[in-house]
Image (cartoon, rainbow, N blue to C red):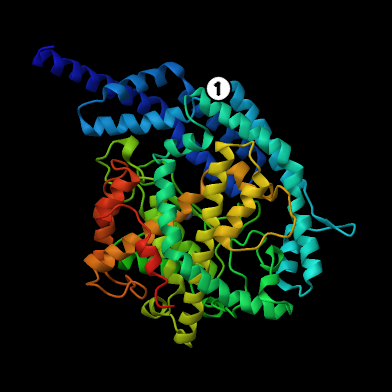
Amino acid sequence: MSGFALADAKNSIDDRARHFIAEHEATIRPLEIEVGRRWWLANISGKEDDFARKQQIETELDLKLADRSRFDELSALRKEKPSDPLLARQIEVLYLQYLAKQLDPKLLEQMVAKANAIEKGFNVFRPEVNGKQWTDNEVRRLLKSSKDSRERRQVWEASKRVGSQVEAELKELVALRNEAARKLGRKNYHALQLELSEQSQEQVLKLFDELDTLTRDHFQTAKAEFDAILARYFGIPIDELRPWHYHDPFFQEPPAVFAADLDSVYAKVDILKLCRDFYAGIGLPIEDVIARSDLYEKAGKSPHAFCIDVDREGDVRVLANIVPNEQWMSTMLHELGHSVYSSKNIPASLPYVLRTDAHILATEGVAMQFERFSKSAQWLQSMGVAVPDPRSFNETASKMRRNQLLIFSRWCQVMLRFEMGLYDDPTQDLNRLWWDLVERYQQIRRPEGRDAPDYGSKIHIVSAPCYYHNYMMGELFACQVHDAIVRDVLDGAEPLTAIYVGNQRVGDFMKQRVFAPGRTLTWNGLTRHATGEDLNARAFAAEFKGG
Ligand SMILES: [Zn+2]
């Protein structure tokens, strides 16, 4: 081919890509905006009709994205690769979005039905001990307070019985998911899920190995401390501690063994005002978000907290249920962190497809980067809140944060590695795989002779598959960006105590180094752009030094 002909062919690929994207924006974009609007209404009202309307538009969108001929055109364009990098990136992002909806329709229908059946099983399940049925709250309350190891064991075992009840259907679901992934030419469902979010198993495993190496000793130190307290409380030797002695049924969260009252400081605080002042002070004002948001409890409304960018044109809203305590301070800093990493601050000059966060882990990371300040007395005082005993507040809060992060990171190790093994070889001894991982990473002894599908009692394997590692990677991203700000903006302050209050340069940093690229970069490309390095566990691990 002559040079001219080659250029012509390339031009026509760029033209075809442009044409495809224009069609996508004309047909998909209005549907996506409508999904956002109806999602908002349904979660505010809680009404069945509103949920039905949301579901209807979601189905319409899914059907459009499932269109085989559109996907074939995308695959061809991706293979030929447009010469304009911005076009090439859009085609890549769209390819993944459509690929996610190419699952065999019959298999998809079976998967949805199977997952719903299992979730129903979870909803109606009540652990039974001595003829009495327990609610989830009752189980948790007992595991927080009872001193009787025998009773704890009974209740814990009863709560795990849901695993045996759903085991067969869960394995069928895994088989269906794997079959659907293989029909698309992928190794298994886990590998497909990671590919859809621009990750690979090798890459994520390498990061988690590093995380394990860098934090194992810190985790052991923290765990030894509360193991000693727990053993004393139950009047047993430390080596007799078993899973039912830890307050959380999965040991996802720290046992509540340290006196921790952060709430009294917040009892009279106007959480919303603090958020307004803080974000305005760092040059990322949020007045417009607040004006569109729904922030306090009311009947029917979702009890959780979310942030949504409805149209990628600045219509950003937060749903919350604020009450004056530490948890809601942290949650509001978190959700409003999502709100500033949105089309509010991602340049409108970016094409619609790329005018969004680089990755779920990046937006979770930004939210986590800000949420940490609810546990800092310096931050509270700089924001004009009186802290009667700042030293003890900081001691309590930093221990809480440290234990939460360390314990959560071990739990994520178990979930990542278990799900990888589950989809890689569903016929292996999964009961054993689960407890091998729990012993190795969470360092909890398996009950003697226990051979039960305890993994099956974790609903996320059904409802949010292959996803947990993104929370952990978000924490790594948060710490790494925070360190970069300390280095580049705060003149090398101490990362553990650095606060951003009143510093507009922090907002400039976030806008230029984190928000501006939108999704033109991959998650690791963005991490390099913001911090100069690939995502790694060093900044996260450094949080635990010296303690
Ligand atoms: Zn979040």
Q: Residue at x 72, y 47 (%)?
A: 163
Residue 319 at x, y = what percent? 52, 54
Whether residue 532 sits left or right of residue 475 in the image: it is left
- Along the line of sight, the residue nearer the viewer: 539 or 98: 539
Residue 285 at x, y = what percent? 33, 60
Q: Residue at x 79, y 52 (%)?
A: 126
Query: Is residue 367 something that shows in the picture?
Result: no
Residue identifier under label 1: 104
- Along the line of sight, the residue nearer the viewer: 506 or 186: 186
- Inspect the image, locate mark 1, and give the three-letter code of the amino acid beneath it: Asp
Q: Quadrant of the C terminus?
A: bottom left
186 in relation to 509, above or below: above
Q: Residue at x 44, y 42 (%)?
A: 201
Q: Residue furthest right?
A: 131
Query: Is residue 149 something that shows in the picture?
Result: yes
Whether residue 350 sits left or right of residue 413 in the image: it is left
Residue 240 at x, y = what percent? 70, 71
At mark 1, the secondary structure is: loop
Whether residue 243 sits left or right of residue 541 in the image: it is right
